[in-house]
Image: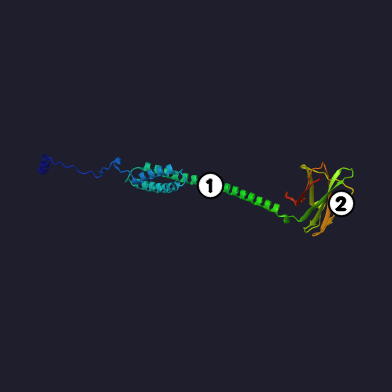
Amino acid sequence: MDNQNNNNQNGNLQTPAHPNAQTPQQPQGALPTSAMAVTSLVLGIIGIATSFLPIINNGSFFLGILGVIFGIVGIVGINKGKKKGKGLSIAGIVLSVITIAVVLITQSLFSAALDSAMNTTNTSSSSQQSQQQSSASNVSAATDSSSTPYEVSIDDATLTTDYAGNQALLVNFTFTNNSDDEASFAVNIMDKAFQNGVQLDTAIVADADTSTSLNTIKPGATINVSQAFALNDTSPVTVEVSETFSFSSDLIAEKTFDIA
């Protein structure tokens, strides 16, 4: 009893410890901000700013991936109560995911546009090449008379009169069938005569047999054919010979006769 009084007098009061007493925790505001969260946000901002730029956005894609990884690591550390900045981590992850999506979409569009341009260029090049080959073929056909299965020579021409007494020009041809089938001059050969640029009509004359043009000849055979044309005046006459069933406009033979 005396000891207790002495302690009270000396001011050495002791309070017994409460069994449920807890140690005060550190205030939330004192926690450091997560470096991972900040890094994720910075990577997301840089990535989305460069994600629309061709070629450069290849690097933006990797920035987006790193931003997602850093953001996830940051959230894990924040959830343990050691760091703060969960909102920064979430923002960084969202921006990084958007960056990845924008890069994939823009590169797909760029690739489609490039493929379309290449296809257009290849089509134009093929068309020009085809036209050049076609032109070369036409030149070859015009200079190579052996491409036709028929050979025709315009031999000579004489002045005569038709059944009505009008002046006419009788032209003599030599026709050779070089094809593998039977042929006739009248069917397989087209002969025309022009005077002053105007095509002349055929004429029927009494002093020559023009029916031989209808005769069919075997492959390798030759026949002489005569055709008469009604004259308009005494100006020169140009006779042209071409193949009837042909897509080419090339002439087999051509010759001009002076009438006067």
- Where is residue 23? Give x, y as percent: 25, 44
**Disc 2, SS:** helix
Quickly name the residue at label 1. Answer: 114
- Where is residue 144? Give x, y as percent: 71, 55
Taking the spot 83% from the left edge, 53% from the top edge, the residue there is: 225
Q: Residues within 10 Å of mark 1 (few under 14, many from 20)?
A: few
> Disc 2 to disc 1, how far (Cα)?
67 Å
Quickly name the residue at label 2. Answer: 211
Q: Residues within 10 Å of mark 2 (few under 14, many from 20)?
A: few
Taking the spot 81% from the left edge, 55% from the top edge, the residue there is: 174
- Where is residue 213? Give x, y as percent: 84, 52
Residue at the bottom extreme of this rendering? 220
Q: Is residue 27 left or right of residue 208?
A: left
Quadrant showing the C terminus: top right
Q: Nearer the viewer, mark 2 or mark 1?
A: 2
Q: Amino acid at mark 1?
A: Leu
| Sooner in the amino-acid sequence: mark 2 or mark 1 | 1
Residue at the front extreme of this rendering? 260
Q: Nearer the viewer, residue 247 or 117?
A: 247
Q: Amino acid at mark 2?
A: Ser
